[in-house]
């Protein structure tokens, strides 16, 4: 069955969200580019999603994220967006999915404007529509989490995924505050035993192998 790469966002569901530069062009050419993209993600997307994993590499990005259910807190956040789509959603004229898609459009537009100004370029930067595929089972979820962290190796940008700066891998090994839902995921591996959970997390990544049968990842 043909994969739908533009599935609608449903509350409480995880999605593999990704995109690349048009014609393979780099999205991130400096440390500051990566930081700016993540800052815009934090501002425009994070209020509506829980982040399980992410990785930015020069010509594309991956996120594994869960749509937060619509509640009073989300409603207050949306009411402060002051966009046409936000107002239409609050007036029940469009769906939650439509509002979230517009937030991603704002993310990409704001990033492209800043990047183009910095680089002295014009025109599109991201390839077509961003892809998002619902993740319905635990096996696929944990495969994708390790796949995302291994992505810099897979594309020959580094020899060791543990040292890649712009991924969520090291957040799982840290006690510092993080926007990653680290504690929830580590508890799934070994509840109430952080040391053992981290060990299982490390082993899962060390044992990771690419599996074509899991492959609905399409970047072209």
Image (tube, grey):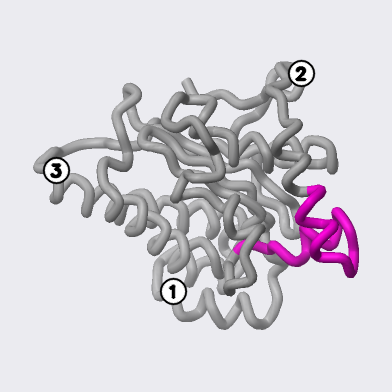
Residue at 52%, 39% in the rendered image: 18
Ranked by sequence position, the earlier of labels 1 and 2 is 1
Q: Earlier in the sequence, mark 1 or mark 3?
A: 1
Q: Are the residues at dot 1 and dot 3 in contact (C-beta closer than 8 Å)?
A: no
Q: Which residue is denoted by mark 2 in the rendering?
A: 213
Task: Tell whether position 197 is magenta.
Answer: yes
Residue 119, by quadrant, is top left
**Residue at left offset 89%, top offset 58%:** 190
Q: Is residue 129 visible?
A: no
From mark 2 to mark 3, how far is it between C-alphas?
A: 39 Å
Left or right relative to 197: residue 106: left
Which residue is pictured at 60% across the width and 31% down the height? 5
Taking depth in this image into account, of 170 and 22 the one nearest to the observer is 170
Q: Give the SS element for disc 1.
A: loop
Q: Which residue is mark 3?
A: 119
Q: Is residue 36 above or below residue 150?
A: below
Judged from the image, the secondary structure of the residue bearing numbered disc 3 is helix
Against 85, is 164 above or below? above
In magenta segment, residue 16 = no
Question: Which portion, as a residue range, is magenta?
Answer: 180-200
């Amino acid at each position: 069955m043909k994969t739908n790469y533009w599935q609608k966002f449903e509350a409480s569901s995880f999605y593999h969200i990704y995109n690349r530069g048009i014609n393979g062009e780099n999205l991130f050419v400096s440390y500051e580019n990566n930081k700016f993209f993540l800052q815009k993600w934090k501002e425009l997307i994070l209020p509506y999603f829980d982040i399980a994993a992410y990785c930015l590499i020069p010509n594309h990005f991956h996120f594994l994220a869960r749509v937060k259910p619509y509640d009073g807190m989300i409603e207050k956040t949306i009411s402060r967006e002051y966009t046409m789509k936000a107002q239409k959603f609050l007036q029940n004229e469009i769906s939650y999915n439509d509002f979230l898609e517009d937030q991603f459009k704002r993310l990409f537009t704001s990033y492209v404007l800043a990047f183009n100004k910095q680089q002295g370029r014009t025109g599109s930067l991201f390839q077509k529509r961003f892809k998002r595929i619902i993740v319905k089972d635990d096996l696929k979820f944990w495969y994708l989490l390790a796949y995302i962290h291994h992505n810099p190796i897979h594309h020959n940008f580094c020899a060791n995924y543990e040292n890649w700066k712009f991924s969520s891998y090291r957040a799982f090994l840290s006690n510092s505050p993080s926007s990653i839902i680290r504690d929830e995921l580590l508890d799934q591996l070994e509840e109430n035993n952080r040391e053992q959970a981290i060990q299982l997390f490390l082993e899962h990544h060390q044992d990771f192998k690419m599996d074509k049968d899991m492959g609905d990842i399409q970047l072209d």
